[in-house]
């Protein structure tokens, strides 16, 4: 009877030991699984869920792309500035060409006009030195001079009115001064007529200017 009790006690003890071992094994497994889960969670946090690419690599790539975009924006601004400058320069060149074209059209005959004026000066000198103003030849010279003046006016070449006008260095060239009853600085004699071609001086008038007594 006592032997049976002893055997039963040993069996119970062995059963308890087995149960404890199983519990320890189960607890160890749970602990291992928990540790693996934590490791996997930590590892997964370092990767993108959709692309499975490391987050650091994604951040570096994003930073690189943003830098490239910034550089492209700077390049666009510079190119735009260069384009605007080029357009402005082309417009200036166009304006200068138009002005030059107008000047060529208006003033291309300047040299020829000066040569024609020298002929006119000779006609005026001939009339001034002719004693008999009723001579037929004198009448012919007067008609020629009048016709020549009309031709000059048709090319916008006009005489500068100078006699009894205040002296203006922009249009007159003083050859001498003379005592006169007129106000000092007044032109009292025109030695040679001055001319304008449009709004530009073709040649100044040669004049004598009054001075005080």
Image (tube, grey):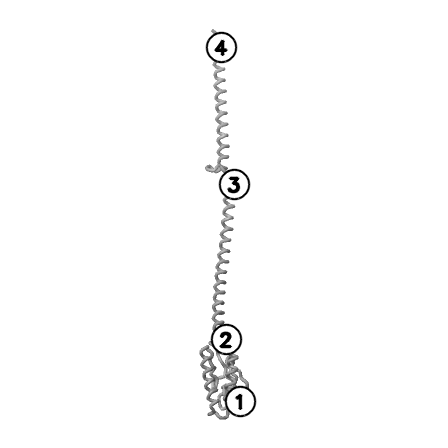
> Tags 2 and 1 in contact by the CB under 8 Å rule?
no
Closer to us: mark 3 or mark 2? 2
Q: Which residue is mark 3?
A: 57
> Tags 1 and 3 in contact by the CB under 8 Å rule?
no
**How far apart, in angstroms, are the residues tagged by discs 3 and 2?**
78 Å
- Residue 117: image x %, image y %? 51, 81
Position of 205 relative to 49 (above/below): below
Seen at 54% across and 87% down, the residue is: 177
**How far apart, in angstroms, are the residues tagged by discs 4 and 3?**
68 Å
- Residue 32: image x %, image y %? 50, 27
Q: Closest to the observer: 178 or 6?
A: 178
> Tags 3 and 2 in contact by the CB under 8 Å rule?
no
Q: Residues within 10 Å of mark 4 (few under 14, many from 20)?
A: few
Earlier residue among tags 2 and 1: 2
Q: Which residue is mark 2?
A: 109
Q: Which residue is mark 4?
A: 7
Seen at 48% across and 16% down, the residue is: 15
Position of 35 relative to 192 (above/below): above
């Amino acid at each position: 009877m006592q032997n049976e009790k002893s055997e039963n006690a040993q069996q119970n003890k062995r059963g308890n030991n087995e149960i404890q071992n199983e519990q320890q094994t189960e607890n160890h497994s749970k602990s291992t699984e928990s540790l693996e889960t934590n490791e996997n969670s930590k590892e997964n946090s370092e990767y993108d869920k959709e692309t499975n690419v490391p987050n650091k690599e994604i951040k570096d790539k994003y930073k690189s792309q943003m830098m490239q975009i910034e550089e492209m924006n700077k390049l666009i601004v510079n190119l735009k500035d260069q384009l605007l400058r080029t357009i402005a320069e082309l417009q200036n060149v166009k304006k200068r060409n138009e002005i030059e074209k107008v000047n060529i059209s208006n003033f291309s005959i300047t040299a020829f006009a000066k040569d024609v004026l020298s002929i006119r000066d000779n006609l005026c000198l001939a009339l001034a030195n002719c004693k008999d103003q009723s001579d037929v030849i004198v009448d012919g010279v007067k008609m020629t001079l009048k016709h020549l003046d009309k031709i000059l006016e048709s090319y916008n070449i006009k005489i500068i009115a100078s006699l009894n006008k205040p002296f203006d260095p922009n249009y007159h060239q003083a050859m001498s001064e003379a005592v006169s009853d007129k106000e000092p600085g007044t032109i009292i004699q025109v030695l040679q007529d001055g001319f304008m071609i449009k709004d530009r001086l073709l040649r100044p008038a040669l004049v004598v200017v009054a001075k005080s007594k």
